[in-house]
Amino acid sequence: MATLAELDVEQLIDELARREQRKGKIYDLFPKDGPFARDKYQQHMAFFHAGNDKAARLALAANGVGKTMSMGGYETALHMTGLYPDWWCGIRYTKPVRWWVAGKTKMTTRDNQQSVLIGRPNAEQEGGGLIPTDLIDFDGLRRWPSGGGLVQSLRVRHVSGGWSYMGMRSYDQDLDAFFGENLDGAWMDEPAPILIFSEIMARFRGSEHPTMMVTFTPKKGSTDLVRMFLNEPDDSREVINCTWDDVPHLDEKWKADTLANTPEYMRDTVSKGVPSLGVGAVFPIQEKHILVDPFEIPDHWPRAYGFDGGWHNTAAVWGAYNKDTETWYLYSEHKRGKAEPPIHAAAIKARGHWISGVGDAYATNQSDGEKVIDLYRAEGLKLHKGDKRDKEARVECVRVGLATGKVKVFSTLQEWLREYREYHYDDNGKLVKENDHLMDATQHLIFEGRHFAKTKAMATQPPMHAPTRTFGRKI
């Protein structure tokens, strides 16, 4: 092989370019200074840092923010090689690791994760991936039969002197393909079936520090895995959201063109990483059209709350009605599960004991539901029984209000927003009755609340014809 001194100018340029390709992109990401300095990627840093004490992390990320290259791929490359930069804020492995990488299909795993980590399929020795080529054992590399170049397993030299192991899988394989291994960690890209996620988590039983990374843009909506992360908080899990506003490398024209050519119901997903409900969304209105910053509500605006009771969850949504514009403003929320009526009643009265509510309570029959309402009344709530007869009419009333700007929502109602994002119809056009208590309360409020809404002055003034008492004895 000719030395650099023996090459002409064009050959020298080509050779230096090839060497640059082979050195690995792991050294290029997150510099200290410049337009793409690491301090401008706070959500990426939060994702890495969460790995110190969380076994599983989900990055719900907008398109183009670097979830594959600079989140899941970058951290995987660091763990495989041990080449942690001085600033690294995540977990560090001091010895070789056993790791899995999994994607939706063999093709997507090959073209996305594999290419990001080790370069173009069947041309990995030319470089172009995050991992330096001189650390990869190409003699021991194995590929899946009929996988179009998808690697089955390979070894990567770790700075400690041993070899890290990487296996690659795809969700379209049988669940059996995810049995048997003992792993330190894994990286799943694209929406993952919850059974495969759970099976891989079970592979960590021998690891000193289990690490699961899941990265995707939630275009499939609120899947079982997304709902588990969002609605079932656990000390072992963390969700990191990364939007277009969280990264400096996206061009404004690209963002504008992308949104202009994306269906409206999908735009928050593409730009904010918000789970999409697609055409099945009950309320397919972008959040930016309905959210307002909190403000002090005028005393002359009547108020009421919608109520939805039940043992697993009881919820209430407070609204103030601007008569001049005929607009409801949802300004407060309450949601709690597995608590007795006195506990909920105390929380509701704390928002204003004079405010009336309307709604329903889940029970085995109508009579029992009315008895539950009576229990809340006995606790001092001004609570009226709502009309249950026409669910779709209540839904349509809210839908029209949101679409026409007659229903606005304070941006601080985070639980309400979580339900809003997940509220959808199934494939048969039926409302999915999961995590919808605040939505039900909202429907009662918007559909019937004006009949009961009052200002504080109206609610606390004595009755017009209150009986008078005569003191002393009539002579």
Image (cartoon, helix red, strand yellow):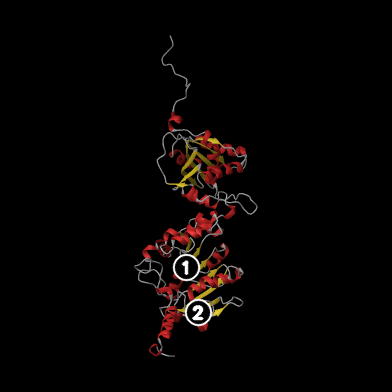
**Disc 2 residue type (three-letter):** Glu
Residue neighbourhood size for the residue with mark 2, other residues' Cα within 10 Å, grouped as few (<14), some (14–19), many (≥20) = some
Characterize the local packing of mark 1: few (<14), some (14-19) or many (20 or more) Cα atoms within 10 angstroms: many
Q: Earlier in the sequence, mark 2 or mark 1?
A: 1
Please, what is the three-letter code of the amino acid marked with disc 1?
Gly
Residue 5 versus residue 339: which sits nearer the camera? 5
Q: Quadrant of the N terminus?
A: bottom left
> Which residue occupies the extreme top position in the image?
475
State the residue lying farthest toward the right.
428
Q: Is residue 77 visible?
A: yes
Say which residue appears at 40% left-offset and 70% top-offset: 29
Q: Is residue 275 visible?
A: no
Of the residues tagged 2 and 1, which is closer to the observer? Answer: 2
Which residue matches tag 1? Answer: 72
Q: Which element type, helix, strand or loop, lies under badge 1?
A: helix
Q: Which residue is mark 2?
A: 124
Question: What residue sits 42% from the left and 79% below the top?
Answer: 20
Residue 116 location in percent, x, y?
49, 72
Residue 222 versus residue 35 in the image, above or below: above
Give the vertical position of 267 relative to 389 (above or below).
Answer: below
How far apart are the alpha carbons under marks 2 and 1?
19 Å
